[in-house]
Image: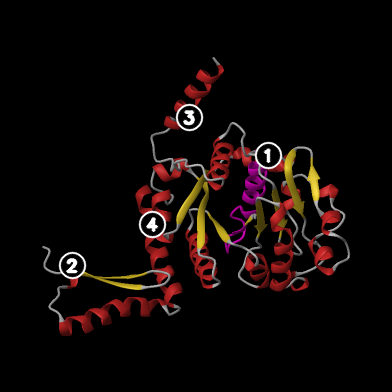
């Protein structure tokens, strides 16, 4: 039970910070990575599990794992 | 020329004032000339934490308005060599001072000190703007809680947007026992999220409350927080001291440390 409260805190914080950093509503935070994936997948063959979006204070990073695996 | 550091957090109650007092006193103990300025207009507290509340005659607003000379407002104390306090005004508010006036004041005094520490009020409004106006760098204080870390992230963004690029983090009131059982975010969790340089970790320590009750500093005292604050001060003077993240098994550091001190005494 103990391990759960840190896990919950980190999840909530991650969502809050992304919304704060993008200055948008929490549901937009969920839609952005999905839209980015959709757009990139039109040009590049990718699988969802290889595609990561990271939003920092100043940048949006799209991480694409390629054919590494 | 002195380094001007704003100590800020966004959220109230995370320990900005206690941190300012202990870093200021710690640096002066290391032989540095230090000035601490209470920027919280209307809610004056830095003097109280330092046990200097009965010594105030003039304050920051008096200096800015030209009602007194700077030297008349500065409070010195024999307990703290090379340290002086410029207290805030209890009956004025944040609009009594402008960022431009603060910038000018700091330019006038910075040559006389090694460090000028600005104790920022909570919030992101004019009090914050006044406090960061003359600063070269920031120390962001947070506790390992969702709300405090969220505000710290916001503050780091605002500092960077204002051109203050060197910002370091102090994680305050870390409950070592709670981190170990997974009920408090660890140092690693917090630094991973905020992604700025970690200047120090201050464990939750009842000695801080006891010292503050008496208007005495805790820095340099033989307790967890006292040692952690002293380490922060030494890092600020350029010493390279690894940050203890308290992730080691219980008692490890205390044992090492007590062994060390015993050997020193022998």
Task: Indicate the position of residue B228 as horizontal and vertical percent values.
Answer: 54, 40
Q: Which mark is residue B192?
A: 4
* Crowding near the residue tagged with mark 3, few <14, some 14–19, many ≥20 C-alpha atoms within 10 Å: few
Residue B186 visible (yes or no): no
Label 1 – label 4 distance at C-alpha = 32 Å
Task: Indicate the position of residue B261 as horizontal and vertical percent values.
Answer: 53, 23
x 39%, y 41%: residue:
B247
Q: Quadrant of residue A12?
A: bottom left
Task: Indicate the position of residue B187 as horizontal and vertical percent values.
Answer: 43, 49
**Is B9 colored magenta in this rendering?**
yes
Q: To which chain does the residue with label 4 belong?
A: B
Q: To which chain does the residue with label 3 belong?
A: B
* Crowding near the residue tagged with mark 4, few <14, some 14–19, many ≥20 C-alpha atoms within 10 Å: few
Q: Are marks 2 and 3 in contact (CB under 8 Å)?
A: no
Q: Tag 3 or tag 4, which sits nearer the N-term?
A: 4
Q: Which mark is residue A65?
A: 2
Determine whether the residue tagged by mark 2 lies in a helix, strand or loop.
Answer: loop
Give the residue at mark 1: B211
Q: Nearer the viewer, mark 1 or mark 2?
A: 2
Judge if badges 1 and 3 mark residues of a common chain.
Answer: yes
Q: Nearer the viewer, mark 2 or mark 3?
A: 2
Q: Are marks 1 and 4 in contact (CB under 8 Å)?
A: no
* Crowding near the residue tagged with mark 2, few <14, some 14–19, many ≥20 C-alpha atoms within 10 Å: few
In terms of depth relative to the viewer, which is nearer, A2 or B92?
Answer: B92
Give the residue at mark 3: B254
């Amino acid at each position: 039970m103990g391990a759960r409260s840190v896990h919950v805190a980190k999840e909530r914080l991650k969502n809050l910070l992304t919304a704060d950093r993008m200055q948008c509503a929490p549901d937009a935070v969920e839609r952005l990575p999905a839209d980015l994936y959709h757009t990139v997948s039109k040009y590049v063959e990718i699988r969802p599990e290889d595609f990561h979006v990271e939003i920092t204070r100043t940048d949006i990073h799209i991480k694409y794992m390629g054919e590494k695996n | 020329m002195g380094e001007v550091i704003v100590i800020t957090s966004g959220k109230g109650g995370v320990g900005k004032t206690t941190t300012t007092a202990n870093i200021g006193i710690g640096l002066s103990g290391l032989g540095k000339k230090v000035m601490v300025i209470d920027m919280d207009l209307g809610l004056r507290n830095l003097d109280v934490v330092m046990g200097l509340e009965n010594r105030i005659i003039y304050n920051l607003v008096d200096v800015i308005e030209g009602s007194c000379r700077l030297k008349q407002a500065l409070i010195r104390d024999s307990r703290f060599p090379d340290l002086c306090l410029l207290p805030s005004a209890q009956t004025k508010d944040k609009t009594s001072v402008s960022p431009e006036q603060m910038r000018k004041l700091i330019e006038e005094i910075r040559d006389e000190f090694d460090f000028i520490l600005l104790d920022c009020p909570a919030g992101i409004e004019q009090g914050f703007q006044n406090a960061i106006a003359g600063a070269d760098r920031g120390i962001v204080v947070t506790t390992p809680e969702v709300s405090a870390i969220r505000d710290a992230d916001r503050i780091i963004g605002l500092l960077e947007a204002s051109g203050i690029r060197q910002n370091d983090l102090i994680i305050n009131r870390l409950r070592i026992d709670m981190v170990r059982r997974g009920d408090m975010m660890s140092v690693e969790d917090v630094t991973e999220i905020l992604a700025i340089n970690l200047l120090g970790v201050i464990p939750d320590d009842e000695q801080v409350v006891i010292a503050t009750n008496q208007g005495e500093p805790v820095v340099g005292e033989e307790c967890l927080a006292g040692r952690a604050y002293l380490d922060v001060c030494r890092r600020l003077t350029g010493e390279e001291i690894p940050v203890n993240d308290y992730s080691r098994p219980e008692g490890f550091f205390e044992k090492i440390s007590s062994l060390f001190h015993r050997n020193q005494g022998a």
